[in-house]
Each structure stands twice: as C-alpha cells, then as structure tokens.
Image (tube, rainbow, N blue to C red):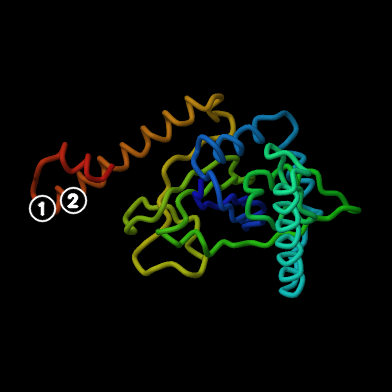
Amino acid sequence: MGTRHLICVFYLGRFVIAQYGQFDGYPEVQGLAVIAFLLAPGNIARLKAGLTHTYAPTAEEVQEMTRSTAREGEEYHAALVRGEVSVMSRMKPTFPSMWRETSAGVLEIVASATAGATVPIYQELGFIHDGLFCEWAYVVDLDAEVLEVYSGVEKEREGSSQRFKDVDGAEKGWVPALVKSFAFGELPGTKDDLVREINEAIEVRAREAVAREQGKDGGGDNAAAVSAVL
C-alpha cells in the first residue's frame, strides 16, 4: 500500500543517497529489505565501492529520466491489459534508481555500479520534514555503522536526533523522530524480531512523551495518555 518513505545512506560525513519510495514503507517490508542487504556478506564493502560510481543528474536529465520512466510505466500497464506480461511480473525501468518503486532496492543497484555503468542518484532529503506524508525513513550510516529508523516528526527536545539539522524544509521546533538505532553488529535477524523491537521502541517513546507532559501538568491518567499517543 502507499506508505511513503525515504531510504538514506550517510557516508564520509554527508548524505549520498536519499531515495524516495512510494509503497510499503513499513519496517516489515522496506526496513527488512534494508537489513537483509546489510547482513549479506560483502554488501557493505560493495555499497561503499559502488558509491564512487554514482552521479547527481542535472535538472534536465532528471526530467528526461522521469518522462522515460512514465512512458515505460504506460507501456507496461498496456501490456498487462493485453495479457502480454504476467500480473506477477514487475516493471524494469531503464533508470531504476530514479523510480519511486525501487525503494530499498537502490542499495543493491548502487552496490552493482561500475565505472562503465554509473548510477544516477536524485536525493529527496527535504521529504524527511513532511510529518504528514513521510511515514518512515531508514538511514544507513556507513561512518558510524548504524541503521537508524525514523517515523514522522516530533517536537524538538533535549535528546532529539540532530541527524537532519542541516536539511532545509523543517518546520520550526519540529524534527524527524528517531524510533530506533541498530548497530550493524546487532541488526535483528528476522522480521518478527525487527517488528518487536520497533514496536517496543515506539511504546517507550510514547511513555517518555507522556512523562514529559505529566511533568509539565503535574500528573494525570498515565495509561490513557499512553494509549492516546500509541
């Protein structure tokens, strides 16, 4: 379903990928795909190497690639209607790194890049500040060797993540809400483990938010307040 998200990579002190995704941004789908990539032997080294073979397309190139992908989408759906391709098949655009359905797949695309087959990367970092539509974001920090999971935005407070502080577009007083940070050596190995750890982190965050509000108000119905946040 349409759950918009970002797949980001931070390397050598800066963001090098900020891939917008249109569908299935939930941890059990895109989050799991990111983790599966990171856990595969050799993939982190491949990703670092592949990043040297990426480039930022010009505005004109972005427009042409977008038009090309749209045309390919129309042709693909027409072929579906004619029964020429299976409904279980998946479109293979000429520029997959520029496609909104590639999502976490961009990691493998970049890892496979070579000097003779460079990959265009169009960053949509500003989307992280859209608290309504950017439901999830995943940041692969190759410098610190951590995976960060974000969901929506929160009122800035002591302890809020400053990961995106230099990214334009934030509403004053609000920052992307960090849900959970996983060291590469401690990534959950199964979907159930990932979902459990994310849900536990969300509940902890909700309880902390309630505690802060109660500290301001002098008390209240804790159980009801946590339920409302969740």
Percent coordinates x, y for residue 67 in the rendering: 73, 67
Closest to the observer, 172 or 142: 172
Q: Residue at x 70, y 62 (%)?
A: 70
Percent coordinates x, y for residue 204 in the rendering: 31, 37
Residue 118 sits in quarter: bottom right
Q: Residue at x 60, y 45 (%)?
A: 140
Q: State the count of labels.
A: 2
Q: Are marks 1 and 2 in contact (CB under 8 Å)?
A: yes
Q: Residue furthest right?
A: 116
Closest to the observer, 7 or 101: 101
Q: Residue at x 72, y 71 (%)?
A: 63
Question: Is residue 74 shown left or right of residue 124?
Answer: right
**Residue 101 in sight here:** yes
Q: How dense is the environment of label 1, judged by Cα within 10 Å: few (below 14), some, or many (20 and up)?
A: few
Which residue has dot 2 on it? 213
Which residue has dot 1 on it? 217
Question: Is residue 132 shown left or right of residue 188?
Answer: left
Q: Amino acid at mark 1?
A: Asp
Q: Residue furthest front?
A: 82
Percent coordinates x, y for residue 34 in the rendering: 61, 39
Question: Is residue 169 shown left or right of residue 103?
Answer: left
Q: Amino acid at mark 2?
A: Glu
Percent coordinates x, y for residue 55 in the rendering: 77, 61
What kind of element bears circle 1? helix
What kind of element bears circle 2? helix
**Residue 13 in sight here:** no
Question: Is residue 176 shown left or right of residue 147?
Answer: left
Q: Quadrant of the C terminus?
A: top left
